[in-house]
Image: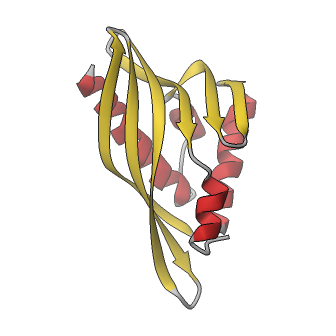
């Protein structure tokens, strides 16, 4: 289980940085996710399908991140909490780097907790729980 999840998040980190550079294949990014998923943050809970609408949302999301100066996303640590033989919760510690005009770079650490399913030795994200991203970005003067 651990090897499959670590491989998933290595790919995730690579795709994040390719996307921030404007060079990602959205089919590849979408391949990290299960056919259906849930997401939760202080703004609410949502459900979605891994379809063309989701891929378009990913494109728009990375365009937004580039527009606010995001230059890199790196994983600092992945810690797993097993649920059963096919599911776990991956606690992922991220570091985001932002280029700020006239102010150099700003580095922000944050965590996201991902629900992962492993079937046939392949891990896929089927949900996540995140903090208040907008408040964090405002606190650090990014937006």
Q: Kindly indicate the quadrant of the structure image that contains residue 80.
A: top left
Indicate whether 43 appears above or below 124: below
Q: Choose between 120 and 78: the one closer to the eye.
A: 78
Looking at the rendering, in which quadrant would you find the C terminus? bottom right
Residue at the farthest right position: 53
Rendering coords of residue 50 (x, y %): 64, 25
Rendering coords of residue 75 (x, y %): 35, 50
Q: Kindly indicate the quadrant of the structure image that contains residue 135.
A: bottom right
Rendering coords of residue 44 (x, y %): 72, 36
**Image point (63%, 25%), residue name:** 38
Q: Choose between 67 and 40: the one closer to the eye.
A: 40
**Image point (67%, 47%), residue name:** 59
Indicate whether 102 appears above or below 79: below
Indicate whether 72 appears above or below 83: below
Query: What colour scheme governs how the chains and residues are painted in the rendered image of this protein?
Result: secondary structure
Rendering coords of residue 104 (x, y %): 48, 85
Looking at the rendering, in which quadrant would you find the N terminus? top left
Q: Kindly indicate the quadrant of the structure image that contains residue 63.
A: bottom right
Residue at the farthest left position: 3
């Amino acid at each position: 289980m651990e090897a499959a999840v670590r491989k998933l998040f290595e790919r995730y980190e690579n795709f994040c940085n390719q996307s921030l550079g404007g060079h990602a294949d959205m089919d590849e990014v979408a391949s990290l996710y299960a056919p259906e998923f849930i997401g939760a943050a202080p703004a609410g809970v949502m459900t979605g399908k891994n379809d063309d609408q989701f891929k378009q949302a990913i494109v728009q999301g990375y365009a937004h991140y580039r527009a606010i100066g995001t230059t890199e996303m790196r994983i600092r640590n992945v810690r797993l909490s097993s649920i059963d033989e096919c599911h776990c919760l991956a606690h992922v510690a991220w570091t985001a780097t932002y280029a700020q005009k006239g102010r150099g770079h700003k580095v922000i650490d944050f965590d996201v907790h991902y629900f992962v399913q492993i079937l046939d030795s392949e891990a896929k994200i089927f949900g996540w729980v995140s903090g208040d991203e907008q408040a964090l970005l405002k606190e650090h003067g990014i937006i």
